[in-house]
Amino acid sequence: MNRYTKDKLIFWLFLAPALLSFLLVVIVPFFMGLYYSFTDWTAVAGETPNFLGFANYANMFSDIAFRYSFLRTFLFTLLSVISINFISLTFAFLVTREIKFKNFYRAGFFIPNLIGGLVLGYIWQFIFKSVVPAIGGLLGIDFIEQLLILAEPNLTLFGLIFAFTWQYAGYIMMIYIAALLNVPQELLEASEIDGANFLQKLWNITIPMIAQAFTITSFLTLVNSFKQYDIIIALTNGGPADIYQDHIVNSTELLAVHIYNVAFKYNNMAEGQARAIVFFIVLSFVSIGQVYFSKKREVEM
């Protein structure tokens, strides 16, 4: 056996456990799920699923709760991506300046990301239900005292976005910090000598130089916003109720929660699987499209 063949053999031997795990845990279950989405599968041992064709998919698109959940997920994702990236970039600018206690601020902004989603959800549930009205009472402001964030559908969605931003902004901030520290200082100094102000330096030098970070952070926030589950369960459990096309729906039952409820709460495993397949396809198209256009923008910059 020559050296090249030996290196190849060692390479595949080390890679084999990871490939086997990926095959057994991701690829095989995915194709099994794809098959079950065309059947009346109930997950009951010993029962053979019957092939139904596209019946589960037809039921899914005729379900008003699914369509509402789909729209609310897109709205939540759009607002979360904007909110998290704006807050993270602001924090990153702040803690890369020559200010006192900047390392303390970095740690403080990152700490919420260490808290689990369920715990974080219960914390913000307490704040929204008890702390906010109490502060309004102390200040004598009736509007704040009577502000029931978790009782009004649109306010509750913004409450979710606020809690998710609070949790995730510190993590995204670390990526922006790394990008900002790599911006050549000589370029900024040369622009200052030429008389450029802060906004001109930001728009013409800093933003183009950290374009790669925008691609990464946008992808991460987009995918995590689409898949958000634990904060919703702890903070709102899908509620409160809302009216959509004359039907009662759950205002914060985003797609991940909706799919879980259909499959396990209402015991429609096959329909839940069909919705999960559509969720996967939509998320794949959106995330690939986002990366493609962000990369293209990097080149233009």
Image: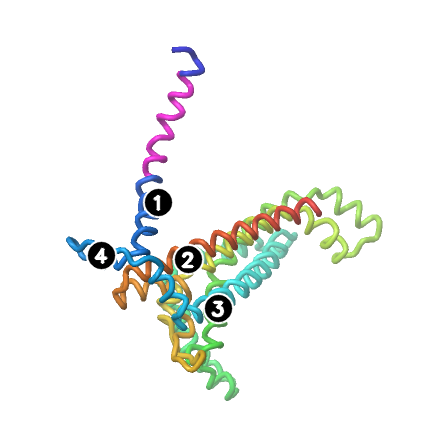
Pointer 3 or 4: first along the chain = 4
The percent coordinates of residue 108 (x first, y second) are 50, 57
- In whole angstroms, how far apart are the C-alphas of marks 4 and 1? 18 Å
Most foreground residue, 124 or 291: 291
Is 175 above or below relative to 23?
below
Please give the residue where the numbered disc 4 appears in the rendered image.
43
**Foreground of the two, 105 or 85:** 85
**Residue 26 bears which disc, if any?**
1
Judged by its main secondary structure, the magenta piece is helix
Amino acid of disc 2: Val
Residue 46 rendering spot, x and y as whole percentages: 15, 53
**Circle 1 sits in a helix, a strand or a loop, which is it?**
helix
* Numbered tag placed on residue 278 in the rendering: 2
Q: Label 3 is placed on what type of residue?
A: Leu
Per the image, the residue denoted by label 3 is 71
Front residue of 214/247: it is 247
Q: Which residues are magenta?
A: 6-21
